[in-house]
Image (cartoon, grey):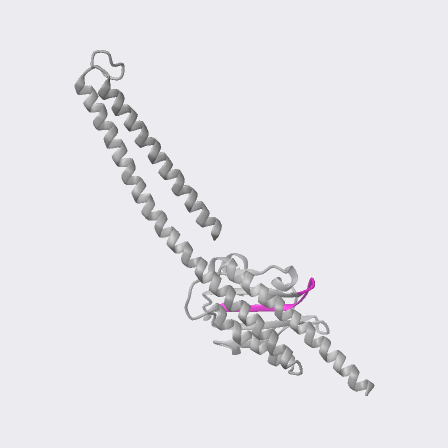
Amino acid sequence: MEQHLNRVARYRRHLWTAGAVLLGALTVTVVLLSSTPSGESSLSTSPSSQGTALVGLCTLVLVFVLYVFYRERELHTVEVQLQGVLVREAALRERIAELSALFDVTTQLAMKFDLHAMLGLAARRVLACLDADQSSIMLYNPNRKTLEVRVTAGVDASLVEGATLKPGEGIAGFVFSSGEALVINPPEMRARFAQEVKLGRHIISALSVPMRFQGTTLGVFNVCRVVEGEEFTPFHARLLLSFAEHCAAVIVKQQHYRRVSGGDRKAA
């Protein structure tokens, strides 16, 4: 987004530079026309033609100046919009960072909680951070070789509860197998996943990102808007991916704690 702001600033500089050059050229031309005697001038043959040339030049410069001011207003509007987006993105980063810290502290204080409780916390908290309506977390079951929905939260959560997919199957299966974070808006859905469109269920926008830890994908984190709101962007996908990887690290930590605790009890 900062690159777009820099591009607007460069365009503005070029626009005003061109305006300054044109005004300078007009000034030089006016001086030449007014200081050269009519009979000796190579620029015109009579005072009337000199006047016509000056009027034409002035009209041209006036039109260009009006165009510059028009483009300047457009650039200002774009700049204000871009700055608003930057502010919103910064706020989202801060909210995700706070959520990650909260989730980490909660896990440290309550490591003995079951995995379902911790994942449920993550699924609920991310809804407010991304202004989403529904979320779900799917984990890979190596015994059954399937992705299984472990927790859901939000509107119509019951529609995806208990769902299972094979790696490579559907959107979540594709994300799990490929490791690609997806921003799924209606055009993308129709173009790449037309078979996944469900009648009677309108999804405004969705995100599906892999939950990775040290190169290993443990599952998939899904978020969608089904009530109202704007479409998600790659920026939202990067934020969710960062949080999903944080959740994956917590899962591994919790599993390690379980193994260690179980070994200690057996030794006792």
- In the displayed structure, does residue 190 sit left or right of residue 117? left
Q: Residue at x 32, y 48 (%)?
A: 73
Q: Quadrant of residue 139?
A: bottom right
Between 86 and 244, the one nearer to me in the picture: 86
In the rendered image, residue 217 lying in the magenta stretch gets the answer yes
Q: Residue furthest right?
A: 267
Q: Position of residue 102 (x, y in %)?
A: 56, 74
The answer to whether residue 116 is seen in the rendering is yes
Task: Give the x, y percent position of residue 146.
Answer: 67, 71
Q: How far from the left and from the top, in percent, is residue 217?
A: 67, 65
The residue shown at (56%, 73%) is 136
Front residue of this view, candidates 53 and 20: 20
Extreme-left residue of the structure: 48
Main secondary structure type of the part rendered in magenta? strand
Residue at 57 percent across and 78 percent down: it is 120
Quarter holding the C terminus? bottom right
Tell me if 23 is positioned left or right of 148 in this view: left
Which region is colored magenta? Answer: 213-224
Does residue 154 show up magenta in the picture?
A: no
The vertical placement of 127 against 29, above or below, is: below
View extreme (top): residue:
39
Indicate whether 227 appears above or below 90: below
Tell me how many marks there are: 0
